[in-house]
Amino acid sequence: MFYTVLVSASKNHIEWLQKFIYKFLKIKGYIAKSVNNSVYQLRYAKAESLKLLSKLYYDSDIICLFRKRLKIRKALSIIRIKIV
């Protein structure tokens, strides 16, 4: 089991992001507050995460944080799924 989590201190931003992603990918996610209530988290579970990540990392030439991509590749390799 794994989650993709997007984090922001702005509730409005997280709600906008959830609506934007739903509009294009038809995945809903879940909005939660952090333990200390300082940030909002938009969480996607495994099946939705796979849809989201395949769109975020669709090409090896996209601009992204290398360590984030490496972390995602490592997590997905456990379930034998490859992304670029």
Image (tube, rainbow, N blue to C red):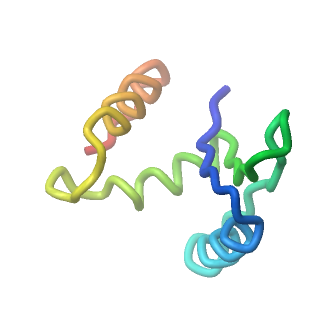
| Coordinates of residue 61 in the picture (x, y in percent) | 14, 56
| Coordinates of residue 57 in the picture (x, y in percent) | 33, 53
Q: Residue at x 77, y 66 (%)?
A: 11
Quarter the C terminus occupies = top left
- Up the image or down, 9 lies above or below 20; here it is above
Q: Residue furthest left?
A: 61
Q: Residue at x 70, y 54 (%)?
A: 42
Which residue occupies the foreground of this view, 12 or 82?
A: 12
| Coordinates of residue 27 in the picture (x, y in percent) | 67, 64
Left or right, 46 with respect to 70, comes to right
Left or right, 59 with respect to 9, comes to left
Left or right, 35 with respect to 3, comes to right
Total number of numbered discs in the rendering: 0
Q: Residue at x 31, y 32 (%)?
A: 67
| Picture quadrant where residue 24 is located | bottom right
| Coordinates of residue 25 in the picture (x, y in percent) | 58, 70
Q: Residue at x 72, y 50 (%)?
A: 41
- Up the image or down, 12 lies above or below 44; here it is below
Quarter the N terminus occupies = top right
Which residue occupies the foreground of this view, 12 or 74?
A: 12
- Up the image or down, 80 lies above or below 59; here it is above
Which residue occupies the foreground of this view, 37 or 16?
A: 37
| Picture quadrant where residue 21 is located | bottom right
